[in-house]
Amino acid sequence: MAISSAIDTLIELAVKDTDEAAKRLGLAIRACEEVQQKLTLLMQYRDDYATRFQHSLSVGLSPSGYRNFQLFIDKLDGAIASQELVLLDAKRRIEEARSAWQENERKRMSYGTLASRALKAEQAKEAKRDQKAMDEHAARAILYKR
């Protein structure tokens, strides 16, 4: 009985840890999706700005306007590079959270296996006791009939 209670406690803790790890994984995935959306927006904005730049070049552009366009494109490229690094970090966090969740899930499942084995062992002992009691009852019945 004490073993079963200890295993049940371990299972409850493992379920709690697994649920928390799943929540952390979900948050990491959501954060990564947000970072990806920001990167996509930056890239779209850069493409739009480059298109406007090309159009401005075709209609004529002053040297200072050209310089301003070029400086802004450089800043956008820097922001895109930074956001790509943030995205890589977010993907790394997803993998770490996924590994933690998988580890917690394995632990929970192994405790479940232990609980199942303990239950089977207890049932086998109980069946053996019942069989012994039935055998003794049958033996007594035969003795009383004589």
Image: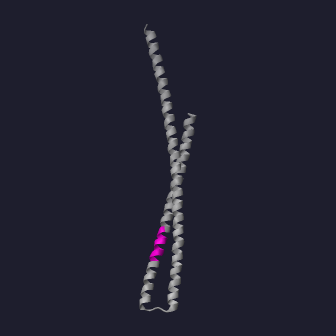
Image quadrant occupied by the C terminus? top left
- Residue at 50 percent across and 51 percent down: it is 102
- Residue at 44 percent across and 13 percent down: it is 141
User: Magenta part of the protein: which range?
Assistant: 36-45
Magenta-span inclusion, residue 40 = yes
- Residue at 48 percent across and 30 percent down: it is 123
Magenta-span inclusion, residue 102 = no
- Residue at 49 percent across and 34 percent down: it is 119
Of residues 83 and 123, which is closer to you in this image? 83
Please provide percent x and percent y for residue 109. Answer: 50, 44
Q: Is residue 27 visible?
A: no
Number of on-image labels: 0
The colour style of the image is one colour
Please provide percent x and percent y for residue 35. Answer: 50, 68
Of residues 5 and 85, which is closer to you in this image? 85
Q: Is residue 108 visible?
A: yes
> Where 101 sits versus 58, above or below?
above
> Where 100 sits versus 133, above or below?
below
Please provide percent x and percent y for residue 17. Answer: 55, 50
> Where 93 sits versus 110, above or below?
below
Please provide percent x and percent y for residue 25. Answer: 51, 57
Image quadrant occupied by the N terminus? top right
Q: Please, what is the dominant secondary structure of the magenta stretch? A: helix
